[in-house]
Amino acid sequence: MEGLTGITLCASMDILAPKQDHCDQLALLLGECEPAKPWQMMYLYTVLYITGFGAAGIRPCVSSFGADQFDERSKDYKSHLDRFFNFFYLSVTTGAIVAFTAVVYIQIKLGWGFAFGSLALAMGISNLVFFVGTPLYRHRLPGGSPLTRVAQVLVAAYRKRNAPFSSSELIGLYEVPGKQSAIKGSGKIAHTNDFRCLDKAALQLKEDGVDPSPWRLCTVTQVEEVKILLKLIPIPACTIMLSAVLTEYLTLSVQQAYTLNTHMGQLKLPVTCMPVFPGLSIFLILSLYYSTFVPLSRRITGHPHGASQLQRVGIGLAVSILSVAWAAIFERYRRNYAIEHGYEGSFLSAMSDFSAFWLLIQYCLIGIAEVFCVVGLLEFLYEEAPDAMKSIGSAYAALAGGLGCFAASILNSIIKSVTGSSEKPSWLSQNINTGRFDYFYWLLTVLSVINFCVFLYCAHRYKYRTEQGVKMEKQILANIKEQSLSG
């Protein structure tokens, strides 16, 4: 809220921003507007980073905290959790729809100051509602800093890197007695044979003594927590490409819309409202998810929820490929049409006989991709993350989204430098009609296909924690049975 308040002041006070005289859309694109002073840029970046810092505290925790409100012992826990993540993302999408419609309307009619002020006011109201409900929340016992535990495992494993597993000084792998682990709010995690180098952090040697330092000796559960976090990384990493595509859509498709007719009957939609359509498709798909998709897919897969979490992520990535492929086909047709009808140099003039609503196809497809991929990923990370590290699991999804934005920016810079020169414009030229956005979309399609193949490999190799637990339990029972028979 403090960051949004600072941005509101930046947009409202003339002293905090450069003069806007004669700075229209064309002048802005051509770089003819008055540049901001260094201290103005410093203020802007400061409030932006404050806003980002606050968002970084909310995003990883809000979904996992909401999921913590359900009782794991309930027979309907799985279905309730599934519905919660769908409802959570529906709420996020509703916020995006309001931002692209109501806030854009306020900005057009009243200016940037009122637009950002409305966001700051909404954030203040949401904070008030959240704190009013504090007595009703269900809290997990805090188990200390998870990052500290990760660091302890890495340091302890490095210290004992030369200690052999068959040493005469070896007592065994360290774990506290009883059913509960040493970490508050977390049960014990059975030992696995993955990442054997980390097991050295749990090697209990005679020299460790009775009360060893946690930076020298860690429990098996603590080591397994780190192993789980490492095994989770490839799955959210495969969603970075989808985040990059979404970021590209927010800019490239808006540039496309500037050249198209955005009239809906007598109503002319602002170009900046066009990104609302993926949100509308998400809203529609989530509304029909349980009544349509789950029953149909249940007949095919036999899965009680229609599809597993990783299957839903895979469906989302596959649909995103269709979206960017269609975007490439459509952009080629749009560009050729603009050149043939004399619009090549008029990249800010709308073609009156070419509707912008052809963009709805790629918008709807990317909305479907978001529904399956993001919701499936959030549920997957929450379910698979260690008990005392649920927020880190959710943070993986937010991190993938942020890295996707950076990847899109880096890719744009590379394409501009490689494809552009003094003699010819780059693929991502400011004049969309002389650039080759279609080539760029095809590049995104190829990268998305490669990313999807990598995901299929990672998903095929991944074993759900529940499957590992059942397998471990069967092995223990088999060992007990064998010992009883031999006895």
Image (cartoon, rainbow, N blue to C red):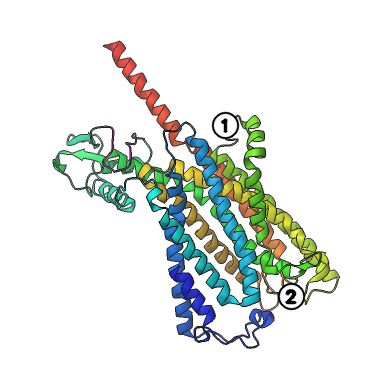
- The amino acid type of the residue labelled 2 equals Leu
Across and down, in percent, residue 46 comes to 44, 74
- Residue at image coords 57%, 63%: 408
Q: Where does the image place residue 52, in percent across and percent down from the top left?
A: 46, 65
Q: Please, is residue 99 above or below residue 205 in the view?
A: below
The numbered disc on residue 348 is: 2
**In this orientation, does residue 320 appear?**
no
Question: First in sequence: mark 2 or mark 1?
Answer: 1
Distance CA(mark 2)–CA(mark 1):
51 Å
The residue stretch that appears in magenta: 179-190
Q: Nearer the viewer, mark 2 or mark 1?
A: 1
Q: Quadrant of residue 72?
A: top left
- Up the image or down, 392 lies above or below 81; here it is below
- Is 41 part of what is drawn in magenta? no
Q: Secondary structure at mark 2?
A: loop
Magenta stretch, main secondary structure class: loop
Question: Label 1 near label 2: C-beta < 8 Å?
Answer: no
Which kind of residue does numbered mark 1 sit on? Answer: Pro
Horizontal placement of 151 versus 316: left or right?
left
Residue 27: image quadrant is bottom right
Nearer to the camera, 50 or 231: 50
How busy is the neighbourhood of tag 1: few (under 14 within 10 Å), some, or many (20 plus)? some
- Give the residue at x 61% y 58%: 246
State the residue in front, 343 or 170.
343
For residue 304, the mark is 1
Quadrant hosting residue 444: bottom right
